Amino acid sequence: MNSKLYVGNMSFKTSEADLRDAFGKFGAVTDVYIANDRETGRPRGFAFVTFATEEEAKAAAEKMNGVDLDGRQLTVNEAKPKTEMGGAGGPGGRTYGSPNRSAGAFQARGNSRY
């Protein structure tokens, strides 16, 4: 297990300070990242909390999973690296019919709109 935790099903009003307070009971919290929507800037309902050690992270995951924070039951588990979550073609990723979708590929294949 690594020292970074995924925290899901968060209330949109939960702040970084709220997470630091709740998770700080289990050890030294070194970083808190709340994911925000790129276009609206509003929270997306999940965050990542990083601890100083793996042991602290494991204890926090076991104790905080299912706990009510700001009216929502948190889902807490080990954060997985992006490569394991799937890239293009994986869950939530985009798939395209053509194998060559790089910039300019349409014209490079001899097709033209003009």
Image (cartoon, rainbow, N blue to C red):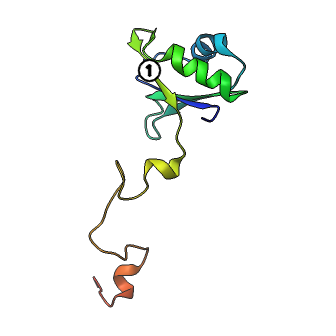
Q: Is residue 52 left or right of residue 46?
A: right
- The image quarter containing residue 98 is bottom left
Q: Residue at x 65, y 14 (%)?
A: 26
Badge 1: residue crowd in 10 Å (few <14, some 14–19, many ≥20): many
Position of 35 relative to 29 (above/below): below
- Residue 75 spot, x, y in % from top left: 43, 23
Q: Is residue 95 left or right of residue 63?
A: left
Closest to the observer, 104 or 48 = 48
In the picture, which quadrant includes the N terminus?
top right
Residue 31 visible from this viewpoint: no
Amino acid type for the residue under numbered disc 1: Met
- Residue 106 spot, x, y in % from top left: 34, 80
Q: Residue at x 49, y 33 (%)?
A: 36
Residue ranking furthest to the bottom:
110
Q: Residue at x 63, y 11 (%)?
A: 21
Q: Residue at x 34, y 48 (%)?
A: 92
- Residue 40 spot, x, y in % from top left: 43, 35
Q: Secondary structure at mark 1?
A: loop
- Residue 20 spot, x, y in % from top left: 63, 16
Residue 46 visible from this viewpoint: yes
Position of 89 relative to 61 (above/below): below
In the picture, which quadrant includes the C terminus?
bottom left
Q: Which residue bears the numbered disc 1?
A: 10
